[in-house]
Amino acid sequence: LFVKEVGGSLKNYAGVPFHFIDPPVIDYIYPSTASVSSRSYISVYGRYFFKSPSLSCKFSSSVVRAEWFSAYHIKCLLPLKKSAKIYVSNNGIQFTNHGVMLNVLPVFS
């Protein structure tokens, strides 16, 4: 695939559409603390979240599909029972360089 700029737009020689998307950026998450006993959804706020089937969140090494609400807001189901940094990917392969810490608290009886 060869791509060149022609009058401000990108053209390719293979007839395949080409779209450049800025990499996602996480500003903050809510809640920033979850309970180990709940099936918590974590809202992730930031920029450049792209609505695609590959939109995903990574908690340590566990990757889950993200639910897209806008270019600034997605939600992910917490898959872990321990604290972890959250990362986001628009394509399921390249994740944000900087994660945001989610604290998972134990249940006290």
Image: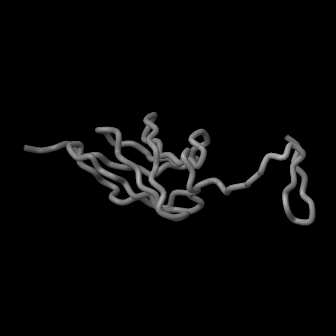
| Residue at figure coordinates x 23%, y 48% from the top left | 35
Above or below 49: residue 78: above
Residue 66 appears at what percent x and percent y? 46, 49
| Residue at figure coordinates x 27%, y 46% from the top left | 39
Q: Quadrant of residue 37?
A: top left
Give the side of residue 76 with respect to residue 25, left or right: left
Residue 92 appears at what percent x and percent y? 56, 41
Hey, which residue is sitting farthest front in the picture? Answer: 15
Front position in the image: 12 or 15: 15
Above or below 70: residue 106: above
Residue 105 appears at what percent x and percent y? 24, 46
Residue 8 appears at what percent x and percent y? 87, 65
Q: Quadrant of residue 11?
A: bottom right
| Residue at figure coordinates x 55%, y 44% from the top left | 54
Front position in the image: 3 or 53: 53
Hey, which residue is sitting farthest top in the picture? Answer: 61
Looking at the picture, the colour scheme in use is one colour
| Residue at figure coordinates x 45%, y 53% from the top left | 67
Give the side of residue 92 with respect to residue 16, left or right: left
Quadrant holding the N terminus: top right
What is the count of numbered marks? 0
Quadrant holding the C terminus: top left
